Image (cartoon, helix red, strand yellow):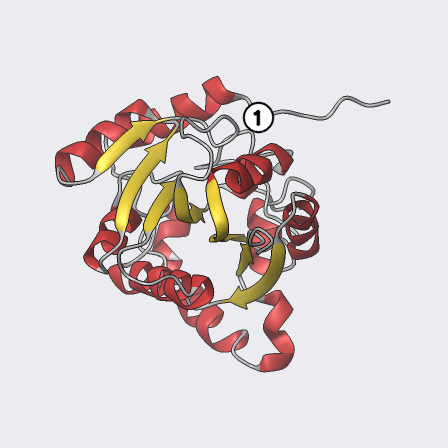
């Protein structure tokens, strides 16, 4: 039997520490960041005051936006450099170094979890799903978003099987996700799961200078081409969301 691949933690840390040393790694425009948080609020249904873990928080952009919406937030990331940046920029928020496959939190600690661009870094996301289940309270919600392998641009540029694949600006662990596979993984962990597809999350940064010059064109095509409902499953991002079942009364 072939052994399951695991995430190379050291390469992941080195990659994001390297980016963090010169750039906070905020790849979306402020408008797109707000839209991600709008989607989290809508899909989770969690009210202000709920305790939220922003896992894979990077430099803390989403954590701060959640705090501004009235949530009690804790941010966590594998990269020490990005956590330093987050603590410096947002001193009123708790930020911790940690691994989504071994969360440094007690059982049933949170009402909600945001997994912002995390799952596509995990060759096998089942352990992350199990840890998310563990730290959520009964009735707790998670929302995850990741690049969609079914999107033609995402596939051609970022999937290793594509003849046009570019390794610039990605780690060795990354691969765009298939929505049904992610949903099945979280369903197997015990969640009630749903899926939503979105395009129009505009980029402001990509590591490749050539690709960066093309971002305005890409952002326009992405916003217009995939707007029709029949193009839904081909949109650039998969939002996976779910609820931990409540304990029996």
- Check disc 1: other Cα within 10 Å, few if <14, some if 14-19, many if 20+: some
Along the line of sight, which residue is nearer the eye, 132 or 166? 132
Name the residue furthest top. Answer: 10
SS at mark 1 in the image: loop
* In this rendering, position of residue 241 left or right of residue 189: left
Along the line of sight, which residue is nearer the eye, 49 or 186? 49
Residue 147 in percent (x, y) is at 53, 52
Residue 241 in percent (x, y) is at 53, 57
Relative to 47, residue 13 above or below: above
Along the line of sight, which residue is nearer the eye, 71 or 118? 71
Along the line of sight, which residue is nearer the eye, 16 or 159? 16
Residue located beneath label 1 in the image: 7
Q: Residue at x 37, y 43 (%)?
A: 53
One can see residue 85 in this view: yes
In which quadrant of the rendered view does residue 189 lie?
A: top right
Residue 186 in percent (x, y) is at 63, 47
The quarter of the picture where the C terminus appears is bottom right
One can see residue 151 in this view: no
* In this rendering, position of residue 178 left or right of residue 26: right
* In this rendering, position of residue 117 left or right of residue 24: right
């Amino acid at each position: 039997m072939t052994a399951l691949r695991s995430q190379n933690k050291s390469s992941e840390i080195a990659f994001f520490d390297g980016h963090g040393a010169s750039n906070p790694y905020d790849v979306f425009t402020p408008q797109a960041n707000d839209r991600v948080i709008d989607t989290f609020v809508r899909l989770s249904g969690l009210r202000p005051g709920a305790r939220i873990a922003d896992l894979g928080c990077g430099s803390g952009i989403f954590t701060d936006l959640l705090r501004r919406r009235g949530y009690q937030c804790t941010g966590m990331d594998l990269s020490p450099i990005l956590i330093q940046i987050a603590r410096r920029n947002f001193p009123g928020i708790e930020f911790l170094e940690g691994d989504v496959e071994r969360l440094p939190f007690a059982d049933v600690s949170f009402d909600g979890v945001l997994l912002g661009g995390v799952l596509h870094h995990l060759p096998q996301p089942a352990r992350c799903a199990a840890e998310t289940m563990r730290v959520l309270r009964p009735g707790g919600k998670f929302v995850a978003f990741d690049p969609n392998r079914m999107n033609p641009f995402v596939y051609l540029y970022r999937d290793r099987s594509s003849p046009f694949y570019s390794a610039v600006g990605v780690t060795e662990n990354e691969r765009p996700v298939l929505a049904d596979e992610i949903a099945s993984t979280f369903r197997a962990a015990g969640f009630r799961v749903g899926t939503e597809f979105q395009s129009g999350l505009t980029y402001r940064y990509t590591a490749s200078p050539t690709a960066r010059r093309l971002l305005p064109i890409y952002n326009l095509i992405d916003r217009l081409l995939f707007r029709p409902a029949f193009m839904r499953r081909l949109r650039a991002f998969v939002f996976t969301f779910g609820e931990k079942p409540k304990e029996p009364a």
